[in-house]
Image (cartoon, helix red, strand yellow):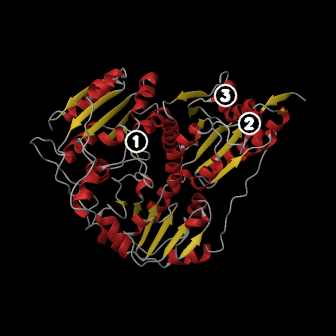
C-alpha cells in the first residue's frame, strides 16, 4: 500500500473537505505542513503576526459559517495565537487550530521553543490534542472537522511535533470515515411543547447557535407562522432583519426598549442557541425559559434541551402558542431603536456623528467592529438587516480584532465590500495586517476613529477612580503610515466630509484608510 507523510495527508483531508484558505505564519516546527501546502489548491494567507492569523480565521468563520483554519509553529508562534483562539472560544466560533511542536523526543526537555502548548490551549478550546502518532493525527483531524461542522462549535487544537508530521502512514487511511454521536436529549420536549401551547406572550431569543445550525430559515418560519416576536443576542444581530415587523432588536445590556420590555414581561422565552450571558440576562425577567443548545455546560433554563437548534425548531413548528395579537400590539408601543443625538455640526467632531455617517456611507457592506468606545456607538446606531452584516468579538472583546478579522471576512464574502471601524488604540495593536490587506488587494475600507486616547478607559477612570492616567496617546501620522503600507488614505475632521469619504473609498474597490478626528472628551452613554 502506498505511503504518505502525515503533513501531506492532513492537507489532502482539508482539500477534500473544501477548505479554501489557511491563515498562518510559518516557523521551523510547522515547515513539513507548509511544504505540503505548496502544491495544494488551498491558498495560504500569510498574516504578519499569528494573532492576526487567528482573528482572520475567526472573521472567515463568522462570515462563511464554515470553520476557519489557522496555523503556527511551536513556542512563540503558538503562543501568539492565544488571543485570537480565546476570542473564538468565548464566542463559540469554529476554528481548526494547528500548531507544530518540537520533535517528540525533545518534548519536556526545555529545549529551544519547547513549551507545554497544550496546557495553554486546553482552557480556551473545546479540545486540545498532542498528536503522538500519524494515524492518530488523521483520525483527530477528521473528527475535528466533523465536530466543527455538525456539533458544538468552538476552537479545536491539534499540536503536532515536527517528527510526527514527517512520519508516513498507509494512504488508505484517508478513505476511512469517522462518526460523531451528537448529544440529543429530547426528554423535555413534551414539557416544552406544553409551555408553548399555553403561552400568550412568547418571545424567541435567538443566539449565534441559530447561525451555526444553519437554522435561520427555520427560525423565520416559526416566528412568522405563529407571529412570535424575536429578540437577539449581540452575535446574532440580523438573524431576523431588524426592519422585520416581528424583530425587536438586541436584548440585554444596550438592548432596545422593546426587546427588554418583552424579555421582562413575556410569559415564555425560547432561548435558541445562546448561552444566556450576564449581559443578556439583564434584559430578562423571572420568566420560564426553554433553552436549546448542544453545549450542556450553558444550559440553565427552566426547561433545558440539549440538542441541535435546527432540529428543535423543526419539531416545535407544529406547536402554536395562543393568539399573540394583543402581545404584539403591546410591544409596538416600545421603541425598537435607540434615541441618540447625532446632528452635531461643529468641530471637534462628535464620535456619534462620525459613526452615523460611516454607517450611512457603508451601504450594504459588511461592518467589522473592534473594541473601544466606538463599539458602543456602532451597536447603538446600527440597524442589522441581515446576518452576517455586523462582525465583532463579543465575549472577550480584544482591542485589535477588527483589522485582521476583516481579512477573513473579505475572503469569505468576495461579493461584499468590508468597512472596519477601529479606534486609534486598537488599530495600533494589529496594524501590521495592513500589509496583508494590501498584498491581497482586498476591498476593505478602514475608518480609524482617532480621539488620541483610550477613550472608554479614560471615561471609567474619571467616573470611578477620580482622574485619568496613562490613557493619552501620542499617535503617529496615520495617513503616512497607511501610505507606507501602499494603502490609499485620507484624513477628515468635518462632519460634512465623512459620508462622501466613505462612499468614494468604497467606489475604488481597493484598500483605503480614512482617519476620522473626533472629540477626545466625548463619553459614551452609561448602560441603563
Find out whether the residues at labels 2 and 1 contact each other: C-beta distance under 8 Å: no
Vertical arrangement, residue 399 with respect to residue 523, above or below = above
Tell me which label, 1 or 3, sits earlier in the chain.
3
Is any part of residue 338 visible from this angle? no
Q: Which residue position is annotated with label 2?
A: 103
The outermost residue toward the right is 1
Which quarter of the image is occupied by the C terminus? bottom left
Q: Residue at x 40, y 53 (%)?
A: 237
Tell me which label, 2 or 1, sits earlier in the chain.
2
Q: Which element carries disc 1, helix, strand or loop?
A: loop
Which quarter of the image is occupied by the N terminus? top right
Q: Residue at x 73, y 53 (%)?
A: 180
Q: Which mark is residue 400?
A: 1
Q: Which mark is residue 253?
A: none
Residue 303: image location, x then y, percent: 55, 75
Vertical arrangement, residue 197 with respect to residue 112, above or below = below
Is any part of residue 159 visible from this angle? yes
Q: Residue at x 79, y 39 (%)?
A: 134
Q: Which mark is residue 31?
A: 3
Front residue (pair 68, 286):
68
Residue 3: image location, x then y, percent: 85, 29
Q: Nearer the viewer, mark 2 or mark 1?
A: 2
Q: Which element carries disc 2, helix, strand or loop?
A: loop
How far apart, in angstroms, are the residues tagged by discs 3 and 2?
12 Å
Question: Callout 1: few (<14), some (14-19), or many (20+) C-alpha neighbours within 10 Å?
Answer: many
Q: Is residue 79 left or right of residue 429?
A: right
Q: Which element carries disc 3, helix, strand or loop?
A: helix
Vertical arrangement, residue 66 with respect to residue 169, above or below = below
The tally of labels here is: 3
Amino acid at each position: 500500500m502506498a505511503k504518505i507523510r502525515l503533513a501531506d495527508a492532513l492537507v489532502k483531508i482539508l482539500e477534500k473537505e473544501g477548505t479554501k484558505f489557511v491563515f498562518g505564519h510559518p516557523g521551523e516546527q510547522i515547515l513539513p505542513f507548509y511544504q505540503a501546502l505548496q502544491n495544494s489548491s488551498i491558498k495560504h494567507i500569510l498574516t504578519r503576526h499569528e494573532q492576526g492569523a487567528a482573528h482572520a480565521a475567526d472573521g472567515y468563520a463568522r462570515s462563511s459559517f464554515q470553520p476557519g483554519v489557522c496555523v503556527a509553529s511551536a513556542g512563540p508562534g503558538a503562543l501568539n495565537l492565544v488571543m485570537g483562539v480565546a476570542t473564538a472560544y468565548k464566542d463559540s466560533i469554529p476554528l481548526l487550530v494547528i500548531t507544530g511542536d518540537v520533535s517528540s523526543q525533545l518534548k519536556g526537555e526545555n529545549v529551544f521553543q519547547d513549551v507545554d502548548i497544550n496546557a495553554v490551549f486546553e482552557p480556551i478550546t473545546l479540545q486540545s490534542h498532542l498528536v503522538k502518532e500519524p494515524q492518530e493525527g488523521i483520525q483527530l483531524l477528521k473528527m475535528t472537522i466533523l465536530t466543527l461542522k455538525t456539533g458544538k462549535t468552538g476552537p479545536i487544537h491539534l499540536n503536532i511535533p515536527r517528527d510526527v508530521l514527517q512520519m508516513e502512514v498507509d494512504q488508505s487511511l484517508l478513505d476511512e470515515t469517522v462518526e460523531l454521536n451528537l448529544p440529543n436529549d429530547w426528554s423535555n420536549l413534551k414539557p416544552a411543547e406544553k409551555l408553548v401551547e399555553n403561552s400568550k406572550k412568547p418571545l424567541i431569543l435567538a443566539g449565534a447557535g441559530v447561525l451555526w445550525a444553519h437554522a435561520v430559515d427555520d427560525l423565520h418560519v416559526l416566528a412568522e407562522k405563529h407571529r412570535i416576536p424575536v429578540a437577539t443576542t449581540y452575535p446574532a444581530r440580523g438573524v431576523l432583519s431588524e426592519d422585520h415587523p416581528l424583530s425587536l432588536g438586541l436584548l440585554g445590556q444596550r438592548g432596545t426598549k422593546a426587546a427588554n420590555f418583552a424579555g421582562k414581561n413575556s410569559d415564555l422565552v425560547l432561548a435558541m442557541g445562546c448561552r444566556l450571558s450576564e449581559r443578556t440576562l439583564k434584559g430578562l425577567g423571572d420568566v420560564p425559559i426553554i433553552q436549546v443548545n448542544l453545549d450542556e455546560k450553558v444550559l440553565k433554563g427552566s426547561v433545558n434541551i440539549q440538542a441541535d437548534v435546527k432540529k428543535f425548531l423543526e419539531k416545535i413548528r407544529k406547536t402554536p402558542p395562543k393568539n399573540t395579537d394583543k402581545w404584539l400590539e403591546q410591544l409596538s408601543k416600545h421603541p425598537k431603536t435607540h434615541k441618540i443625538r447625532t446632528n452635531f455640526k461643529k468641530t471637534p467632531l462628535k464620535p456619534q456623528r462620525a459613526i452615523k455617517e460611516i454607517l450611512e456611507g457603508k451601504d450594504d457592506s459588511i461592518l467589522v467592529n473592534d473594541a473601544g468606545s466606538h463599539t458602543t456607538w456602532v451597536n447603538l446606531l446600527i440597524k442589522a438587516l441581515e446576518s452576517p452584516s455586523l462582525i465583532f468579538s463579543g465575549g472577550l472583546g480584544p482591542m485589535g480584532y477588527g483589522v485582521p478579522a476583516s481579512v477573513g471576512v473579505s475572503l469569505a464574502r468576495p461579493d461584499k465590500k468590508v468597512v472596519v471601524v477601529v479606534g486609534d488604540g486598537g488599530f495600533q495593536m494589529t496594524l501590521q495586517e495592513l500589509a496583508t490587506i494590501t498584498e491581497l488587494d482586498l476591498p476593505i475600507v478602514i475608518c480609524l476613529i482617532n480621539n488620541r486616547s483610550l477613550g472608554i478607559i479614560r471615561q471609567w477612570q474619571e467616573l470611578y477612580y477620580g482622574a485619568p492616567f496613562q490613557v493619552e496617546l501620542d499617535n503617529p501620522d496615520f495617513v503616512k503610515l497607511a501610505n507606507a503600507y501602499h494603502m490609499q488614505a485620507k484624513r477628515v475632521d468635518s462632519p460634512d466630509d465623512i459620508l462622501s469619504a466613505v462612499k468614494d473609498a468604497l467606489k475604488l474597490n481597493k484598500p483605503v484608510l480614512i482617519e476620522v478626528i473626533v472629540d477626545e472628551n466625548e463619553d459614551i452613554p452609561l448602560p441603563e
